[in-house]
């Protein structure tokens, strides 16, 4: 069963702007009208040429065995009719080329913001924690249970729930050791993340206990227990999303210049590649 990655859905989106695959922020797209595109295609007719034609009647000479008339060999030739333009060529006028479409102006590069040491340390801790939690959630999402032994399948899933919950607990604790970043709304972001990730970690651990107590004897009962576990996780994730919605409504998302600076931190480069 595939799940949304919590760190990407909330904190990472607010802080980093996007998540995964090394995407760059704010991709710029340019559009060219179909009329402009069509105008660059010019159709010109090939100039047809009419070659002059002349026909010459070969000289006919008549001789008889009895007599030969000296100088009387008549020659018949075909001359062009009066008024005929011999060798005339017809050339079509070429079409006027259309003006090429003007290229879109390239987007101005975003200058990175200057971050102080406290802010860099905070973002470094955030990105390192995001890498760990995202990896734990991926292992949970990509688990392929072996139903030949339902109890083992159940234990594997329960272990990954505990692993993910512990990763969020550690994420929250490590982030809490850092001073809040000195950016607009830094204190609010710091508090919301520390509290939100701690709550999410606790939710995973609680769900792991409930899942561990469920009766699993076959694939059907396993899937039912997993569905119940995901419902509990989704509820905790929804609460975290609500927190961040209220923050972004109050302070807005981080500016592009800050995001550019954050992406230059090695741990944040790894987070984007996760």
Image: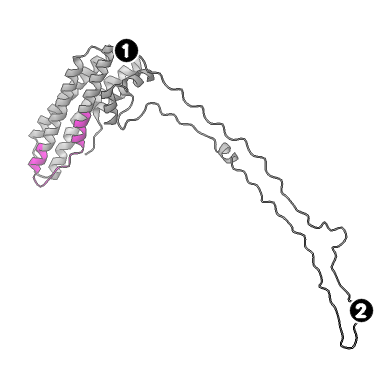
Q: Residue at x 63, y 46 (%)?
A: 43
The label shown at residue 1 is none
Q: Dot 2 surroundings within 10 Å: few (below 14), some, or many (20 or more)?
A: few
Q: Residue at x 28, y 16 (%)?
A: 120
User: Would you say 74 lies left or right of 220 here?
Assistant: right
Image coordinates of residue 111 in percent, x first then y, are 40, 18
Residue extending farthest bottom: 66
**In this view, 143 is above or below 239:** below
Residue occupied by mark 2? 70
Q: Residue at x 69, y 51 (%)?
A: 47
Give the magenta part as a residue range. Answer: 133-155
Q: Look at the image and tell me in which quarter the C terminus lies.
A: top left
**In this view, 4 is above or below 182:** below
Image coordinates of residue 220 in percent, x first then y, are 15, 44
The label shown at residue 183 is 1
Query: Looking at the image, which is closer to me, 222 or 82?
Result: 82
């Amino acid at each position: 069963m595939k799940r949304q990655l919590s760190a990407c859905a909330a904190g990472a989106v607010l802080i980093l702007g996007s998540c995964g695959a090394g995407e760059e922020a704010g991709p710029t797209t340019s559009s060219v009208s179909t009329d402009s595109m069509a105008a660059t295609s010019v159709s010109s007719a090939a100039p047809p040429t009419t070659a002059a034609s002349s026909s010459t009647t070969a000289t006919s000479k008549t001789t008889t065995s009895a007599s030969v008339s000296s100088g009387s060999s008549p020659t018949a030739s075909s001359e062009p009719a009066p008024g005929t333009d011999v060798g005339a060529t017809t050339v079509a006028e070429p079409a006027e080329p259309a003006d090429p479409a003007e290229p879109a102006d390239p987007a101005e590069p975003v200058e990175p913001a200057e971050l102080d040491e406290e802010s860099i340390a905070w973002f470094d801790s955030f990105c390192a924690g995001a890498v760990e939690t995202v990896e734990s959630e991926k292992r949970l999402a990509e688990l392929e249970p072996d139903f030949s032994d339902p109890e083992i399948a159940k234990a594997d899933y329960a272990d990954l729930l505990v692993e993910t919950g512990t990763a969020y607990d550690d994420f929250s604790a490590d982030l809490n050791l850092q001073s809040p970043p000195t950016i607009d709304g830094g204190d609010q972001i710091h508090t919301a993340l520390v509290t939100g990730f701690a709550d999410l970690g606790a939710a995973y651990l609680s769900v792991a206990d409930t899942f561990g107590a469920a009766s699993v004897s076959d694939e059907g009962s396993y899937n039912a227990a997993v569905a119940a576990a995901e419902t509990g996780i989704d509820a905790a994730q929804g609460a975290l999303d609500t927190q961040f919605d209220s923050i972004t409504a109050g302070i807005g998302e981080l500016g592009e210049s800050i995001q550019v600076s954050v992406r230059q931190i090695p741990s944040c480069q790894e987070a984007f590649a996760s």
